[in-house]
Image (tube, rainbow, N blue to C red):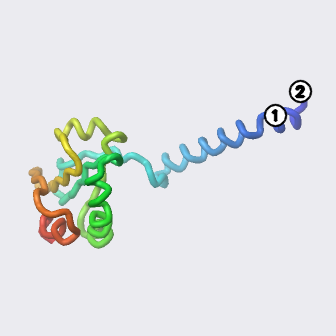
Amino acid sequence: MKFNVLVKKYKYVIVVISLIALFVSMCEAGKCEKQIENFEIGNGQEKHCVLFHSKNCGWCKKMMPEWKKFKNEHSKHLKITEVEASEQPEIMKKHNIKGFPTIIFFENGTSKEHKGDRTANDFKTFVGI
């Protein structure tokens, strides 16, 4: 078969493969927005606030606007991370997460779980900002 005939016949396959290759190269370069972080939580000395959530959880969906507000206002001063249950089950298991949403603040090798209201101001108070 001639090259032009092959290209016409398999153009969609070529496009899909090209897009996958582009996506993989962007993730490897650290530019992938949905890239799953491979991080160690709570092992360092820095302050780290982590939201463990599920995209299917109604309580998580209801709280998310307040969490986003908190994250936008304080991510320059504090490491703030979201861990989605279906994307990182090994981290959920490691930290014994049983329900959603669960917010844990790590500092100096210790951790504490948020038990208060689910508002940006309460998150701020929880982490001591």
Marked residue nearer the N-terminal end (1 or 2): 2
Asked if the residues shown at circle 1 and circle 2 are in contact, with their CB atoms under 8 angstroms apart, the answer is: yes
Q: Give the image location of residue 58, x and y in percent.
A: 29, 52
Residue at 18% across / 69% down in the picture?
Answer: 124
Specify the label residue 1 is tagged with. 2
Categorize mark 2 by other alpha carbons within 10 Å: few (<14), some (14-19), many (20+).
few
Q: Give the image location of residue 80, x and y in percent.
A: 27, 59
Amino acid bearing label 1: Lys
- Tag 1's secondary structure? helix
Q: Residue 85 or 50: which is nearer the viewer?
A: 85
Residue at 70% across / 43% down in the picture?
Answer: 15
Residue 99 placement, left or right of 6: left
Q: Residue 54 or 62: which is nearer the viewer?
A: 62
Q: Is residue 80 above or below residue 54?
A: below
Q: Is residue 128 above or below residue 20?
A: below
Which quarter of the image is occupied by the N terminus?
top right
Name the residue that disc number 1 marks.
9
Residue at 30% across / 48% down in the picture?
Answer: 57
Count of number-bearing discs = 2
Residue placed farthest to the right in the image? Answer: 2
Residue at 35% across / 48% down in the picture?
Answer: 55
Give the spatial CA distance, label 1 vs label 2: 11 Å
- Tag 2's secondary structure? loop
Residue placed farthest to the front in the image? Answer: 58
Q: Residue 19 or 61: which is nearer the viewer?
A: 61
Q: Give the image location of residue 91, x and y in percent.
A: 26, 40
Q: Give the image location of residue 10, x and y in percent.
A: 77, 34
